[in-house]
Image (spheres, rainbow, N blue to C red):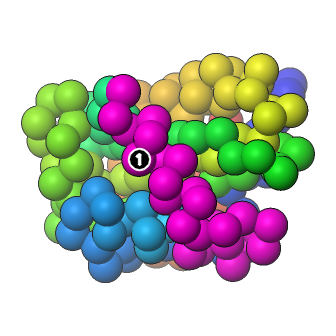
Amino acid sequence: MGILLKDIFDPQAIILNLRGKTKGEAFIELSKALAAASPECDTAAVVEALWEREKKMSTGVASGVAIPHATYRGLKNAIGAIGISKTGIEYGALDDKPVYVIFMLVLGEPAEESHLRILNQISRLAHSEALALVRDAKTVQDISAILSRF
């Protein structure tokens, strides 16, 4: 079956109520959570890599979802953080609407070849009824249970 999303998104890197109101604030908040779960990640370096990718095209894909992603040297696998905003974040999304759920993905070089498959899994989740369940989740365990289906 391959990689499950629950194996990529450590519960420690899931934020149920993002405080940031901008894309930049959300990147910093999620990168800090990611570094807490994966100490080999440097917050500033992850944020810089995300902005480099974002310059090419917004990762705010629609339906209130963003999937910022970047490659990070020194990682062996793909890791990620999830942030949920109750009020929405001005993200510069492709549909010009606020983003409520951010699936941040950081890929080690060995994981680069599987990144399209992982992005596809996130996209499937984002275009299913599970997205509403993620948005309304009350606990990190609720989100982990949803991720285990994808």
- Determine the residue positioned at 37% across, 76% down: 17
What type is the residue that disc 1 sits on?
Trp
Name the image quarter holding residue 135: bottom left
Q: Can you say whether 92 is above or below 134 in the image?
A: above
Q: Is residue 33 magenta?
A: yes
Q: Can you say whether 58 is above or below 46 in the image?
A: above
Residue bearing mark 1: 51
Q: Is residue 131 visible?
A: no
| Label 1 residue SS | helix
Name the image quarter holding residue 35: bottom right
Q: Which residues are magenta?
A: 32-56
Name the image quarter holding residue 5: top right
Residue 1 percent coordinates (x, y): 86, 25
- Determine the residue positioned at 65% across, 39% down: 71
Q: Nearer the viewer, residue 39 or 18?
A: 39
Q: Nearer the viewer, residue 39 or 81?
A: 39
Residue 89 percent coordinates (x, y): 21, 59
Q: Quadrant of the C terminus?
A: top right
Q: Residues within 10 Å of mark 1 (few under 14, many from 20)?
A: some
Q: Is residue 26 visible?
A: yes
Residue 36 percent coordinates (x, y): 69, 78
Residue 62 percent coordinates (x, y): 27, 32
Q: Can you say whether 65 is above or below 111 in the image?
A: below
Is 109 left, or right, of 65 in this rendering? right
Is 114 left, or right, of 29 in this rendering? right
Name the main secondary structure of what is drawn in magenta.
Answer: helix
Q: Give the residue at the far left of this rendering.
A: 96
Q: Is residue 28 magenta?
A: no
- Determine the residue positioned at 54% across, 67% down: 44
- Determine the residue positioned at 23% across, 63% down: 22
Is 9 left, or right, of 14 in this rendering? right
